[in-house]
Amino acid sequence: MVPLRILIDVPAHPPGMVMLESLGQQVSVDVWPEPEERSRPLPAERLRDVDLLFCTFPPSNFADLARVRWIQIASTGYAQLFGLGLTERGIAATNGRGCFDVPIAEWNVAMMVNLARDVRGMIRNQDAALWDRGARFQREIRGMTLGLWGYGGIGRQTARLARALGMRVHVLTRGGAIPPRENVYRVEGTGDWNGTLPHRVFRAGDEDSFLRELDFLVVSLPLTKATEGLIGERELRALPRSAFLLNPARGPIVQQAALLRALDEGWISGAALDTHYVYPLPPEHPLWRYPNVILTPHISGSSMSQHFRDRVWDIFGKNLRRYLAGQELLNRLTPAELAGD
C-alpha cells in the first residue's frame, strides 16, 4: 500500500499528531517546521510528491505540487485559492468553515452591546474623570432588530445568541431560502442547523425592505467577485440613521468611500469593524478618528486561541478519515466558489 503523502504547513497540534500516528502506514507526514500565514515559496523537492496539503496559504510555487489532490485550508475565507486552477486540475479544496462561528458570533454580540451603550464614550469619560449618567449609556439590545446579510455558520450562531438575548433576527440571502446545512463542520450545540431561527427572511432584490427596519447590520458574507463593494451608498442610506454597521467579514465588501461619508454625514450611528481595507490599518487612516467607531485588529475569529487549533485540526482529522474512506468531505468548496463567483 502506497501511503498518502501529507504536507502540513500549519502549527502542529499534539492531539492531531496522535491522530495521524494512529493511521499508521496509510499516511506519510511531512510537517513544515516554520509555518506562516502567508504565501511564500517552499522547496520544490518537498512539494513534488505531496498528495494532500494542509495550510492556510498555499506556497507561491504552487505549480510544484504536481500530485496534490486535496487542499485543506485553516481559514474560512478562501480568496487565496483563486486563480490556482484547482477545479481544472481536479483538486478538491476544503476550508475552515465552522471554526470561527463561536468567537465571531460572540464578537458580534459584544460589539452590539458596546455600540448600543456607547462603551467607548464611557471609557473616555473614565479617562477624563467625568461623571456622566446619560441615557445613551443605558440602552438595551433586547427587542432590537439584527440584520444578517448572509446566513452561513457565523450568521447562524449569531442568530442563536441574538434570539437568546430577545432580539428580532432578519436575514438576507441570495435566494430568500435557508436550507439545512449538510457536510459542514460545526461545534456541537451551536448555530441554526435547520434554519428555523430568523423571524423574517429576505431575498436579493429586497435589500431596501431588509435594511430599513434594522438596528444592527452584520456583514456575514465571504469576499467574492459578487460581494466586493456590495454595500455602498444606496445600502448605507437605506439603513435608519440610528442603525449600526458591524463588519467581521471582509473590509472591501463595504465600499470604503461610502462608509466614510456615512460616518461623516450621519447616515448611520456608528460601526464596529474587525476587517479593514489595509493591513495593518495605518495611523493616518481616517477610520481611527471617529468616536462612534470601534476598530479591532482582525481578531474576532480568535485564531490564536486554543479552541481554534482544536477545531481546525478536528476538521482536518474528520476530513482525512473521510478522504481515506472515499466519503464526501466537510466544507468542500464548489467550482463556483473557487472561481470567486
Image (cartoon, rainbow, N blue to C red):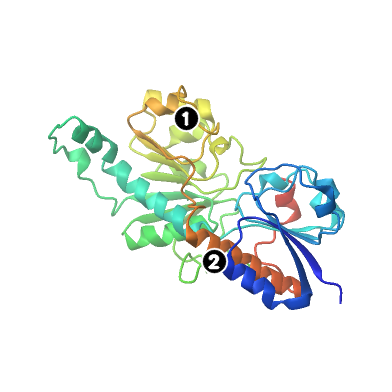
- Residue 233: x, y in percent? 50, 29
User: Measured along the vertical axis of the image, is residue 326 above or below residue 110?
Assistant: below
Type of residue at label 1? Answer: Leu
Left/right of residue 162 with respect to residue 1 in the rendered view: left
- Residue 260: x, y in percent? 45, 26
Q: Nearer the viewer, residue 63 or 211?
A: 63
Count of number-bearing discs: 2
State the SS at label 2: loop
Q: Which mark is residue 259?
A: 1
Farthest top residue in view: 284
- Residue 28: x, y in percent? 77, 68
Please tell me which of labels 1 and 2 falls first in the chain.
2
Type of residue at label 2? Answer: Arg
Residue at the image point whose x is 55% and y is 32% from the top: 277
Rounded to the nearest whole Å, what is the CA distance between mark 1 and mark 2? 32 Å
- Residue 210: x, y in percent? 46, 46
Q: Residues within 10 Å of mark 2 (few under 14, many from 20)?
A: many
Task: List the residue tagged with mark 2.
Answer: 186
User: Measured along the vertical axis of the image, is residue 325 above or below residue 8?
Assistant: below
Left/right of residue 78 with respect to residue 191 in the rendered view: right
Q: Residues within 10 Å of mark 1 (few under 14, many from 20)?
A: many
User: Measured along the vertical axis of the image, is residue 270 above or below residue 85?
Assistant: above
Quarter of the picture holding the N terminus: bottom right
